[in-house]
Image: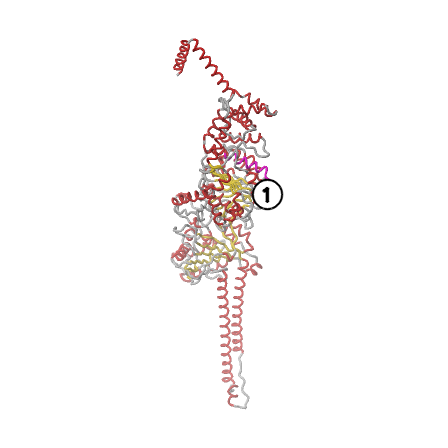
Amino acid sequence: MSNNNKEMDALGDILSWAAGLGIAGFLVDRLIKSLTEHVKELKSEVFAGGVPAKTAEAAGNTATATAPHSTPMVDALSNWAMYGIEGAAVAGILYAGSVLYQLKQAKKYVGVVRIIPHAKTKTSEADIHDLVNSLWYTRRGKFSTLYKGPCWFELLFHCDKSRKPKGEEDLGEIAIYLKYPRELKDEVFQVIRDCYRNCELVDVDLMDIPFPVTEVGTGGVLTYKTRKEKGLPFQSFEKKEQLSKILSHMRPGSYLSFTFRRATKWKLKRTIKQNRKRYARKYKDNPPQLIQNKDKALVDRQAHAKNQFDVQIKVWSELMGKSAKNLMNNLQRTLNHYNELIVKETKKCPLTVAPFPLKNKILMTGNELATLLKLPDYPKKEQVDNAEEHITSRIPSRRSGQNLIAPDDMNKGVFAGTLDHPVKGRKIFIPLNNLNNMLIVGTQGSGKTSEALEIIRGTHLPKFFNGEYGGFFVYDPKKEFWSTLLTDLRKWKMEHPEKFERMKDKIHIFDVRNDKYTFGLNLLEQMPGQTTDEVVNTTIDIIRNAYESESAWFKKYARLSLKALMADKTTQHTILAVPEFLKEDSPLRERIMAQLANGDDYEKQLYEDLEAESKHYGTNKTEPLLDRLTDLKDNELCKRVFGQPTGSIDFLKWVEEGHIVLINGEGLNESEQSILMGYLMMQLDYAARHRKNKLEKYFVFLDEAHNLKKLPILHEQALPKWRSKGIVPILLTQFLDQFHPQLRKSVSSLVDNILIFRSLGEAAQDILNNVPDAKFDLEDLTSLKSRNCAVVTFNKYGERITFFMTVQPPYTWDEWGEAVDFSDPKRASMLQEIAWKQAQEEMEDIMERDGLTIEEANEAVTQYLAEIRKGTTSKQIEKQLDQTVQDELSKKRKKKNPNQSKTIDLFKRLEGEGGE
C-alpha cells in the first residue's frame, strides 16, 4: 500500500467520524425540539384551562385560542440541549480539522533517514540511555508545535528479499528507517551518531519508504492487557540487548514499527497514583504478596523514571503465516513484566504516514523504551569463529571506508564499476581529469582482470567503434586477458560489421606463441629524434634489469658492443648480434672496426676503445653478457621476436591516432618477459615525449607489472611525467611487495587511483601502511568477495575519498555473441578455450597484416645471423697461414729424414696419450 493510500484512509476515517457526529447532532436536536413543543402544549392545557390553539382553530371557535404558557426550565433545557449538541458537532468538526491539519503538517515537516550501522558496531548501556534522554529533550518550540504539530519519532524495520542465490533459504534483509522532525535534522543526526558511532545516515524521501502493496496480510497493534493497570512497569533495559531475538523472526514482507513521542511527567505520575489507589481500595490493609510487589514496582518506576514516552507498537506481515505471530509473541515476551501487552489484530495494515491520532498508545519510561532502541551489536569473536548465525548478517551495514558518493559526483568519465553500498548502488565513473594513473592490486582470481575489462568494455570499445578516440594498449603475460578481449572484438565484428571494418586498420594484435604469425621488436632500432646513446642506455637498462646483473664488465662491454653495432652503416643489427660481436674471433667485429677506423672522430674514438679491449673478447670478462644473450638467442620464440632487423610496432603513430594494441607474452620466462615489457614501455615513453595530441588520454594496461623489476621507467617516467603527456598507466599486480622499493615509494605518493581487491594478511597490511588515506579494516580487505574492491581516489573537489565497488565477471563471448555459461565449471572451461581459439583464428588476418609468417620470420633471422657470421678474421688467416707453413716444413723434413719424422710423430702421439 502506498503512503498516499494510507493517508487517504486515515482522512476518510476522520471525515466519516465527523460527518456521523454532525448527523447525530442534527437528529437529536430535531427530537428535542419536537418534545419541547409537545410539553408546551400540555402545560398550557393543564395549568391554564384553555384550549390549545390548534384545537380551537380546528373547531371554528371564535374565541381567541389560549396561548400556551412556557416555563423558564423547559426553555432553558431546550436551549442548552440545542447548544450542547451543536457545540459537540462543532467540536467534532474542529477536532477532525485539527487532525487533518496535523496529518498535513506531519507529512510536510517529517524527515526520513535510513540508518546504516557500522559492521562492527558496539554500543554501551550509557550510549543507549544518552540516546533516549536526548530524544526526550528534542522538541519543537511552543509556536512551532502549534504550527507544525507535536514532535514525534518512528523507528521502522522492514524485511525485504535478500540477494542470496536461488536455492538458498532467504530470511531477508532488514532495513532500518527513522522518521523525525525535519527542521531538527542536525540535532537528531548528531544524537544518532553519538550512540551508533561510524554509522551512515542516508536521507530518504517519504514516498520511497517501503509500504505493503496490498491489504492482504496479518498483524496488528500491541496494547494493554488490562487498562486498569497501565501504570505498571514493562521490562527495563539491561546490558544485554533484546532486539536481536525480535528481529530474528522477521521474514520478507514484514514490518515492525515503534512510534514514540515525549510524554509529560504528570501523566506517568497520575497513572501510577490511580493504580495504587485502586489497590488500596480493593485490598485495604491486607494485600497479597503479588499486589505488594506490584505496588513496590509502581513506586520504583516513578522514582527512577527520568523521562517517559507515549509509544505505539505496530506489526504487519504480507505473508499469511506464523512469522507475524511469532514476531508479536516475541515482542510480548520481551516487554512484558508486571504490565502485560496483548495484540489487537487488525484487518488492514496499521502502518501510517504519520501517527495522528496516536491510537492504542502505551506509556513507557525511557529505560523501558531503550529495550526497543538498542540495535544489535556485532557478534562476539567466538560467534564469528564458529560461524554462528547472527542477525547482523541480515542488516545491511557499512564497512570502514564504505561511503556513499554524492549523486552529482563521479557520474562522468571512465566507467569503473558499480558502487557497493547497502542503500544506493549506482554506476561509478572516474573523471578524466582525475585519471592520470591507476594501481589494481589483489590476489590471483580476485577480480583485477575483471576491473580492466570493465573499464575497456564500459568506455573504450564503445568510443573506439563509434569513431571517437578510444584506443588503448594491453600487455598480458598469461593470455587470459588478451584472449577474452579477442572475443570482445569478435562480438563487435558480428554485431556491428560496418563499424568494425571501418576501424579495423586501427587494431593491432600480437602473440608470441602464435604458430602462424609473429612480430618483430628490435631493441637497436633508432626512432626519429633518438640519439645513439639513448638507444644504447635504454637497451643496457633493459638487459641488466631482466637478468639483474650488477657486473661492471657487463655494462662496459655491452655499451661498446651496442655502440659498434649501431655504427655499422651496412646492416641494421639486433641484440642477437652481440654474442657474435664478443667472440674471440669475430668477422663481424673486425668488419665494423674496419669501418670505424676510417670514420669520423666519434667512430675513430670508438675504434680505439674497442681495440684497447681486444684481448678480453671471449674471456671471462665478457662471459656474463655472452651467457645471457646466448640464452635469449637459443629460445626460438625470443629469437623470432628479437632477431628481426625490422620492427612491427609504431607506437608514436598508434598513440597519436588512438589505436588498439593487444600483445600476448605467454611462453616467455620471467627474464624474457622483463625484456619484452621493458622495450614496450620504452617505446611508449618515446611516444609520450613526442606525441602532439596530448589532450586525448591513451590507456596502457600492464598485467603483472612487477615483471619490470628495477627498470626505472615506471617510477622515473610513467608515474610522474606521463600525466602531462596524456598517457595513463594502469598497473596490475598481486601485492605491493613485488614492486621494487623505489616503485613502491612512487605508488604511495604518485598514484591517484588505487583499487584493492582481496589481499592476503601481510599483503593487505602492507597496502594499509603504504597507501595514503586507505581507511579500511584489515579484515575487510582479506575477506573481500571476488570482483569486490576497495577504492581510494579523488572526488570532483580534489578530496580523497574511499568506497567499495563491484565489477562484472570477465565474460567470454562465444561464436553467437553470448556469454559462456559457468554454471558447470568444467564444461565452461572447455567452452572458454574453444571461444578463445575461435576468436584468435578470426583475428589472424590482422596478425598477418602487421607481422610475418613463422617461416618468413625464421628465414629473415637465419639470413641475418648467417650474414653477420660471414668473413674470416685476421687471426684466422694467420692461423691458416701458420698451418700451411708448418705443413710445408713437415713435408720437407720427411723427405730429408724419414726416420726422424716417424720419431717425431711417435713422440707427439705418446705426448697426447699422456695428456689424456
Q: Is residue 807 magenta?
A: no
Above or below, 258 relative to 540: below
Residue 774 visible in the shown view:
no
Instruction: Please give the name of the residue rendered at 59% of the width and 37% of the height, measured from the top-left corner.
Output: 690
Position of 818 with respect to 595 (left or right) is left
Above or below, 52 relative to 383: below
The colour scheme used here is secondary structure
Coordinates of residue 218 in the picture (x, y in percent): 41, 60
Nearest the viewer among 24 and 383 is: 383
SS label for mark 1: loop
Nearest the viewer among 216 and 535 is: 535
Residue 370 visible in the shown view:
yes
Residue picked out by circle 1: 695
How would you rate the neighbour count of disc 1 (Cα within 10 Å): few for under 14, some for 14-19, many for 20 or more? few
Quadrant for residue 831, please give it: top left
Q: Main secondary structure of the magenta part?
A: helix
Coordinates of residue 525 in the picture (x, y in percent): 55, 33
Instruction: Please give the name of the residue rendered at 57% of the width and 57% of the height, measured from the top-left corner.
Output: 141
Say what amino acid the circle numbered 1 marks.
Answer: Leu
Coordinates of residue 552 in the picture (x, y in percent): 52, 25
Name of the residue lying farthest toward the front = 895
Coordinates of residue 543 in the picture (x, y in percent): 51, 30
Nearest the viewer among 32 and 585 is: 585
Q: Which residues lie in the magenta part? A: 676-692
Q: How many marks?
A: 1
Q: Is residue 691 magenta?
A: yes
Name of the residue lying farthest toward the right = 601
Q: Quadrant of the C terminus?
A: top left
